[in-house]
Amino acid sequence: MAYLITFFVLVSFWFGRAKETGEPEMSSAAYAWAVLLHLLSVTFLPFSMLAVGRYDLPAAVWIYGANMILLALTAIAISLIAERDRGRARVQNGRVELGILIVSAVLSIITSLFAPDSAMLLYLLNLASPFVARAISTLAGAEAGL
């Protein structure tokens, strides 16, 4: 279960990076450092996945959750820095989905204190993230039209 969840998280990050277009030809130092920190957090995924897969302990869930939060925060930083460097915002920046990942990680960490064996199931909340992002986008568009 932990492997599949981790695989789909990696897929979502890969799709997010693949959708990125118009990045500055010469990246700023801040952009380079944000990408490197993001890649570093990606390298922690096998360890955190193995920890949560092998040990039915709150600490294992905390390690995995911290890894997910670091991945999401660095992905948000990359998009913010890219927007700053380009001088314009992206329409689809993935921040809603990343916010849901952070929320699911925090909820998983909290749940691990009471039920570590089912704490990872809270990551299934991420399945709703495309619908939430679409709803927020629709609401924002409706408000802009007023």
Image (tube, grey):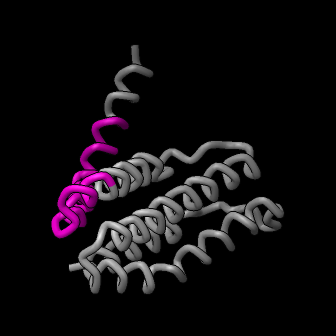
Q: From which residue to which does the magenta span run?
A: 110-137
- Could you tell me which quadrant the N terminus lies in? bottom left
Front-most of residues 126 and 117: 117
92 in magenta:
no
Location of residue 86 in the rendering, given as x and y in whole percent from the top left corner: 73, 50
Location of residue 75 in the rendering, given as x and y in whole percent from the top left corner: 55, 60
Residue at image position (66%, 70%) is 37
132 in magenta:
yes
Residue at image position (41%, 46%) is 96
Front-most of residues 92 and 37: 37
Q: Quadrant of residue 41?
A: bottom right
Q: Where 146 falls versus 133 (above or below)?
A: above
Residue at image position (56%, 53%) is 76
Residue 69 vs residue 113: left or right? Answer: right
Front-most of residues 137 and 65: 65
Kindly report the secondary structure that dominates the magenta region of the rendered protein.
Answer: helix
Residue at image position (23%, 54%) is 125
Residue 41 vs residue 96: left or right? Answer: right
Q: Quadrant of residue 11?
A: bottom left
Q: Where 133 falls versus 73 (above or below)?
A: above
Location of residue 107 in the rendering, given as x and y in whole percent from the top left corner: 30, 51
Q: Where 4 falls versus 34 (above or below)?
A: below
